[in-house]
Image (cartoon, rainbow, N blue to C red):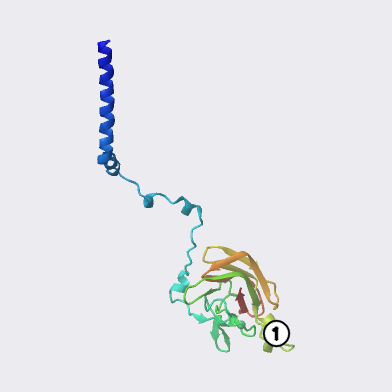
Amino acid sequence: MKYVISIILSLVIIVVVSVGTVSWMQKQGFFDMAVSSGNTVTATDMPDISEDATEPEPIHQLPPDVQDNRYEEFEATNGTFDRVKASSYADWQGTKGLPSWAFDADANTTWQDGVKDGYGEGEWFLSYNADGSTRTISSVTVYNGYQDLKYNNDAQNFYQLNSRVKDIMLEFDDGSVYVFTLADSPEAQTFSFDEPVETCYVKLTVESVYQGKWSDTCLSEIVYR
Ligand SMILES: [Ca+2]
């Protein structure tokens, strides 16, 4: 019995001493030091799950054709984008068709391609803003061919004599592409996109043409809205 009491007293003493030691170590910050001395992971290192779940912000960047000086820049005044470059334009004796004339809110002024061979398939317009800002657009309206009423009458018909645009391709800064087929008609033709596009440029490429007697392909007006 004497031994049993001694063992119980010993165990009680061991427990009391152990609890006291742990309590003292906690007060001294031993355990805090053990945690902080390891490789702690801060909040900034943690992957932001909420960020991954959202769509990344689109990068609106002008294409190289605008960033260099290979092509002449013209002012556009029909209100959507204020600058335009084109792959070519007519400018020789008796014939002139500036790119800006397809973006001047006047159907009687006309762009004509500047290629000597062929009908202008592959020629393009690049519309953008001088300050690189974006626009949100949802449609394009085209006035096809040579529309100037002074040259479209009983004596002559410049709309029919010149070539007109058939298929156009539109490209935006997010990489999306639309292809539309124009009617061979001087009436205004509007094509809507599946959804509005925010972009800092629109590139319109002439994919195919309706051939006239003359190989000059014409567009009188292009309006992005
Ligand atoms: Ca015009």
Residue marked by disc 1: 157
Query: Is the residue 13 above or below the residue 197 in the image?
Result: above
Identity of the residue drawn at 69% across and 87% down: 149
Can residue 136 be spotted in the picture? yes
Q: Is mark 1 within 8 Å of ligand 1?
A: no
Quarter of the figure that contains the N terminus: top left
As helix, strand or loop, the secondary structure at mark 1 comes to loop
- Of residue 179 and residue 197, the one placed in the foreground of this image is 197
Quarter of the figure that contains the C terminus: bottom right
The quarter of the rendering in which ligand 1 is drawn is bottom right
Mark 1 crowd level (few <14, some 14–19, many ≥20, 10 Å Cα): some
Q: How many marks?
A: 1
- Image coordinates of residue 78 in percent, x first then y, are 58, 80
Identity of the residue drawn at 50% across and 52% down: 53
Identity of the residue drawn at 27% across and 40% down: 27
The answer to whether 199 appears left or right of 142 in the picture is left
Query: Is the residue 39 above or below the residue 55 in the image?
Result: above
Can residue 181 be spotted in the picture? no
- Of residue 125 and residue 214, the one placed in the foreground of this image is 125
- Of residue 204 and residue 38, the one placed in the foreground of this image is 38
- Of residue 161 and residue 100, the one placed in the foreground of this image is 100
- Image coordinates of residue 139 in percent, x first then y, are 63, 70
Quadrant in the rendering for residue 94: bottom right
Quadrant in the rendering for residue 77: bottom right
The amino acid pointed to by label 1 is: Asn
- Image coordinates of residue 22 in percent, x first then y, are 28, 33
- Image coordinates of residue 170 in percent, x first then y, are 58, 68
Identity of the residue drawn at 73% across and 89% down: 155
